[in-house]
Image (cartoon, rainbow, N blue to C red):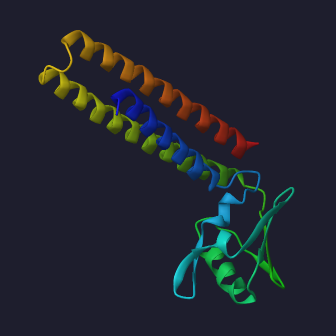
Amino acid sequence: MDIIKDLEVKLKNTIEALNISFQTIRSGQPSPRMVEDIKIEYYGQMTPIKALGSISIIPPREIDICAWDKGVVNPIVKAIENSSLKITASVDGNTIRINLPTLTEERKQELEKVIRKISEESRIRIRGIRDEINKIVKKKEEDKEFSEDIAFKKKEEIQKIVNKSNEEIEKILEGKINEIFR
């Protein structure tokens, strides 16, 4: 595989992972992603909530989970309340209702720190990928597969792609911060 294509695929996956992890973080608006991957034990298997019921959003700040099996309602409630979301749930038959309180200024600042940390971890991953690809270029140069000029141009191209990915991470971060402080 072409090393530039390989780099682009790895960076795209890193940015997608960042987007997914940001969707699980609470902002001013509810999202099914906040709860869908929380796992509970169901017949001896760790099963995500999304496989045990339907999740819907009731504006402005409510998430409803309609469990398909009455037996999983209480384990779902426990899993949600024990999660890092710091929220409580109420039960109405097979429906679990989560009313998200408005975020306090202190909680918003905590969330900002969390998303900045996650963004930095993504940037670190990107630097690692860049270094890995640059080692491949250097090896090809040493093995005389690339001339010195071609190796230099490949490294420049790699850095441009990495810079573009870092800019994208910054845009995603700013968007999430705006969403939290809205």
> Residue 170: which quarter of the image?
top right
Relative image position of residue 149 (x, y in whole percent): 24, 9
> Residue 74: which quarter of the image?
bottom right
Relative image position of residue 12 (x, y in whole percent): 50, 37
Q: Nearer the viewer, residue 152 or 99?
A: 152
Name which residue lies at 52% across and 82% down. Answer: 45
Left or right position of 78 against 89: left
Left or right position of 152 against 69: left
- Pick the quarter of the image with the N terminus: top left
Q: Nearer the viewer, residue 99 or 37?
A: 37
Q: Nearer the viewer, residue 79 or 115?
A: 79
- Pick the quarter of the image with the C terminus: top right
Relative image position of residue 24 (x, y in whole percent): 62, 56
Q: Is residue 138 above or below residue 177?
A: above
Left or right position of 18 against 154: right
Residue located farthest toward the front when viewing the structure as drawn: 1
Name which residue lies at 28% across and 36% down. Answer: 132
Relative image position of residue 129 (x, y in whole percent): 34, 37
Name which residue lies at 76% across and 70% down. Answer: 54
Residue located farthest toward the left when viewing the structure as drawn: 143
Residue located farthest toward the top when viewing the structure as drawn: 149
Q: How many marks?
A: 0
Name which residue lies at 73% across and 85% down. Answer: 69
